[in-house]
Image (tube, rainbow, N blue to C red):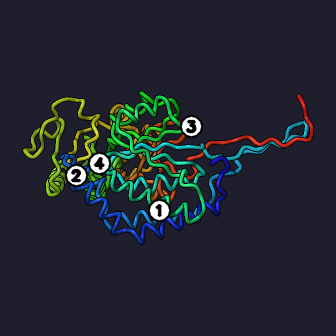
Amino acid sequence: MSITLDISQRNAVLQKMAVLVDQHRDSIISANLKDLESYTGADVAMRDRLKVDHHKIEAMISALEQLASQEDPIGVERFRFTHDNGMQVYNKTASFGTVLIIYESRPDVTIEAAGIAFKSGNKILLKGGKESLNSNLEIVKLWHQALKENTISTDWVEYLNYNRTETQAFLEKPTQNVDLIVPRGGEKLITFVKQHATCPVIVSGRGNNFVYVHNEADRALALDNIINGKTDKISACNAVDKVLIDKNLPNKEDFVRNLITTLKNFNVEILGDASLSKYDEVSPISNEGIWQEEFLDYKIVIGEAENAPEAISKINKYSGGHSAAIITRNQKQAETFMANVDCAAVYHNASTRFTDGFQLGLGGELAISTDKLHQRGPIGLQHLVTNKWYIHGDGQIR
């Protein structure tokens, strides 16, 4: 695999893969059923991510079709310069080479992340969790069929069926070249990868997303925003875990009562600071460390903020650097909040559930990075590239 595939080859594989996923949806769901039956854990979020149904199959097909329709991310000119000596200097995007994706429970990553890496001209190494092995192997079989039917080596998409010990050994001393590692999963997985990896790692870290209800908020909008962020998909890293309500919100008590009642209707466990101590439905916070936790569950913490600066300070102290939202009618306050909150995605009057490559116009995502190098937030085609300098001369020497 020494020569980069041209864009027509890459697109042909993606288009064929979309057809194959559609044709073999029953076999994918059947393989996934084996994984679901074998899963004995009590983690609701894990089970939700593990499950593949027709809705997820449609999303897989859509992601592949969108990827095939997008512009080639390789060879895009970023900079040009004519040297005094006449040399023509260009900086263009280039593939990394080989990307290792380590992930837990989500078979759709075997489609979406692999598709983005492949479209970006990279060889993909996939290391999924044991809980989704049957689903992943079924999907990789289709990748290999799509590659073969386009007379392309199946080495471009490789599945590493390794246990933890074998994975650690590979990270510390890879048996083949690896240029970039992207771990997608919980903090334990990310810590494990960072501890043992010998090449660059892009961290797709914890969510723990905040919503700040400013004192000039539309209360109905705020209620809808929080409920959507908390209950639409609890297993998502862009779900809401923490709510800060401005101390001076008009009719604050009515808003809090409505919020509590609505959350309880969704069976959400509510924890609160001292400002919510009078509400029987709210359990007191046992320790301050809970502000730092990502729940991935029907659980939320609600607290009070003295003002916007205090809300910003608390978010920057405890959030995972993923997403945060302010609900306010005051445009200036929104701009100040968004400029000062240290998160990859900041929202004004919109749900954190939109922190997603597909939703933000990228046509899917490899991961959502909470790092600042080399890309922050959803990593799409445009970002899964490095760069390369091209210098054309006619005999210049220095």
Lower position in the chain sequence, tag 3 or tag 2: 2
Lower position in the chain sequence, tag 1 or tag 4: 1
Q: Is residue 227 visible?
A: no
Q: Are marks 2 and 4 in contact (CB under 8 Å)?
A: yes
Which element type, helix, strand or loop, lies under badge 2?
helix
Lower position in the chain sequence, tag 3 or tag 1: 1
Total marks in image: 4
Q: Residue at x 48, y 67 (%)?
A: 18
According to the picture, the residue beneath numbered tag 4 turns out to be 131
Q: Are marks 2 and 1 in contact (CB under 8 Å)?
A: no
According to the picture, the residue beneath numbered tag 1 turns out to be 63
Percent coordinates x, y for residue 183 in the rendering: 42, 40
Lower position in the chain sequence, tag 3 or tag 4: 4
Foreground mark, 2 or 1?
Answer: 2
Q: Residues within 10 Å of mark 4 (few under 14, many from 20)?
A: many
Kind of residue at disc 3: Asn
Kind of residue at disc 4: Glu
Kind of residue at disc 1: Ala
For this rendering, which residue is in front, 334 or 285? 285
Distance, label 1 to label 4, CA atoms, is 23 Å
Percent coordinates x, y for residue 313 in the rendering: 36, 32
According to the picture, the residue beneath numbered tag 2 turns out to be 38
Distance, label 3 to label 2, CA atoms, is 34 Å
Residue 48 position (above or below residue 55): above
Distance, label 3 to label 1, CA atoms, is 28 Å
Distance, label 3 to label 4, CA atoms, is 27 Å
For this rendering, which residue is in front, 165 or 73? 165
Q: Are marks 3 and 4 in contact (CB under 8 Å)?
A: no
Lower position in the chain sequence, tag 2 or tag 1: 2
According to the picture, the residue beneath numbered tag 3 turns out to be 177
Residue 373 position (above or below residue 9): above
For this rendering, which residue is in front, 337 or 36? 36
